[in-house]
Image (tube, rainbow, N blue to C red):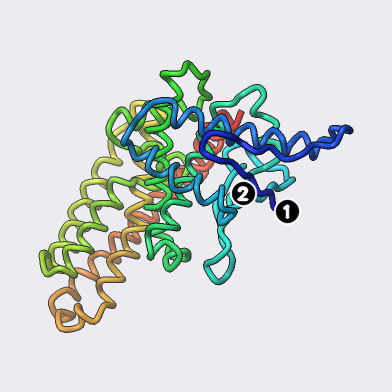
Amino acid sequence: MKIKVVVFAIFFFLLISISSSFSQENQIDALLNNIVADLHRVVFSKPSDSLINKYCTMIFDKINKHELVFNIVKEETPLLSSTGFGFDENGLNPYIVINDKLILRYKTQPSIVLSMLIHEIAHAYFYYTDKYFVQNKDNELEHFFYEMDARRIEAMFILDYLIPLNYQLSLYEKYLYNSHKSGSLSGVAMLFDKINSDVLYKYYNFQLQFFQNKCSLETVFSSFISDSNQLLLMYEKPFENDWNRYTFLITLYTYYNNIPKIINQLVNSEKALSQSSQYSKHFDEMNKLLNTIQFTLANNSNLSFIDKFSNDLIIKMNQ
């Protein structure tokens, strides 16, 4: 892993010196500087009070002050796994990871590189402005929500900045911004995370309401039992196409794999202890439904279908 400091000012970019030999490493360094300069130009090409400008104003300043650096890695990774954001074990020394192959790809496919960098800039902004970002680094649910927020920023960037400048978009970018235009990134989460985000947000809101004394465990259990029974009834009907089958199974899998984790957090909370006698029968019913859902997912090669369908689409997105 190579740490790369990209330095720039508001109007002038100070490019690193390049040896006359123009080694590939120096070419990558120079190209990364050009990429950051191009991103700055694109973002601030028009006056705006958008979130994109707000995020980039702060993060470009952090880069300029060497408080945020780039780590260039040389590994064989899929295109859409070529960037990342991280920090050390103490939550300090933040960095943006970028693969050298992605940097070189900028010559032929600049839009995807800029989009992926905006995604990481969003994470960097969360790092500097949200005190819970580091605290929740191992929280699977919170990590997913931060990822969805970064995707939303990325989609806004594509729609408001790249398309007006006539950038040629990748298949992934088209899928992302079309999902954003439709009003929900649920399809993106279904494909890349195998989660129905609409369902997850629904039960996360239940969790918030429970701790605010705005709903009871009875309400949460009743919703889960009702939703699960309806889904199991729907499974008996034929699917119109593979995408409908896939999204249905992902929804079912979300109820099996993700929602019980939220409910268990509520059940095991101090607030719920006094209500244990009231929800015990619902807990038993939920477990019976989970067993039925597990059997359904394992039936008719559903799990292997999920993996193959998502992998085939993601391979196309990575081209």
Residue 92 rendering spot, x and y as whole percentages: 55, 66
Residue 33 rendering spot, x and y as whole percentages: 65, 37
- Does 2 sit above or below residue 132? above
Q: Which residue bears the numbered disc 1?
A: 1
* The image quarter in which residue 135 lies: bottom left
From the viewer's side, name the closer residue of 94 and 250: 94
Q: Amino acid at mark 2?
A: Val
What is the secondary structure assignment of the residue under circle 1?
loop
Q: Quadrant of the C terminus?
A: top right
From the viewer's side, name the closer residue of 68 and 265: 68
Taking the spot 74% from the left edge, 36% from the top edge, the residue there is 28
* Residue 241 left/right relative to 169: left
Taking the spot 59% from the left edge, 32% from the top edge, the residue there is 318
* The image quarter in which residue 6 lies: top right
* Numbered badge on residue 239: none
Taking the spot 58% from the left edge, 50% from the top edge, the residue there is 96
Residue 95 rendering spot, x and y as whole percentages: 58, 54
Q: How many marks?
A: 2
10 Å crowding of disc 2: few (<14), some (14-19), many (20+)? many
What is the secondary structure assignment of the residue under circle 2?
strand
Direction right: furthest residue = 21
* The image quarter in which residue 14 lies: top right
- Does 50 sit above or below residue 166? below
Q: Sequence-wise, which precedes: disc 2 or disc 1?
A: 1
Taking the spot 39% from the left edge, 46% from the top edge, the residue there is 148
Residue 45 rendering spot, x and y as whole percentages: 44, 26
Query: Is there a contact, CB below 8 Å, between mark 2 and mark 1?
Result: yes
Q: Which residue bears the numbered disc 2?
A: 97
Q: Amino acid at mark 1?
A: Met
